[in-house]
Image: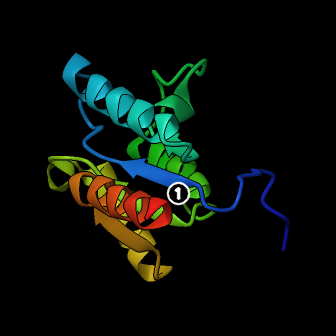
Amino acid sequence: MTENPIKIEKGTVFICGKASEIEVAAFQEFADFEAKLKAKGIKCINMHTIFDNLDTESFTISECVNRCAAYLVMCDKVVTLNNWQQCFNAQSLINVARALTKTIVHADRFLELIEKESQNVSA
């Protein structure tokens, strides 16, 4: 068995959402949520940025899911954005996360939990 060459810090969160259509709004939702997490000091992988600087024109859905899954397996949690259920790629990745018994939580709930945790720490 070969070692996974992807190195991700412990505690990293994988951001999963609708990605089957290249829409500015979808990219923006990912980027906005990634910025919120980074502002709180949380390491994350944005599934859209995995493909930065790659020529994805000829990628199949399978290749996209496999590439994302390689990152997902290295993350501790998966956070879902709105409309992830409408995307085959995101559904496939959530199924991988479930099979690996990863913690899966919606973005809004995740932010609530982080806020509660920070309040408990400062109390």
The front one of 52 and 10 is 10
The front one of 2 and 47 is 47
The front one of 77 and 27 is 77
Residue 79 left/right relative to 76: left
Please, is residue 106 above or below residue 27 in the view?
below
Locate residue 93, reporting x and y percent: 39, 60
Residue that protrudes farthest toward the front in the picture: 123
Residue that protrudes farthest toward the right in the picture: 2
Residue at image position (51%, 55%) is: 13
What count of labels does the image hold?
Answer: 1
Locate residue 25, reporting x and y percent: 20, 22
Q: Residue 48's image quarter? A: top left
Residue at image position (23%, 30%) is: 21
Residue 8 left/right relative to 87: right
Locate residue 96, reporting x and y percent: 44, 70
Residue at image position (30%, 37%) is: 19
Locate residue 79, reporting x and y percent: 36, 56
Residue 69 left/right relative to 106: right
Residue at image position (53%, 57%) is: 69
How does the figure colour the protein chain or chains? rainbow
The front one of 94 and 114 is 114
* Secondary structure found at label 1: helix
Please, is residue 25 above or below residue 66 in the view?
above
Q: Residue 41's image quarter? A: top right
Q: Amino acid at mark 1?
A: Ala
Q: Which residue is mark 1?
A: 69
| Few, some or many residues within 10 Å of mark 1 (<14, 14–19, 20+) | many
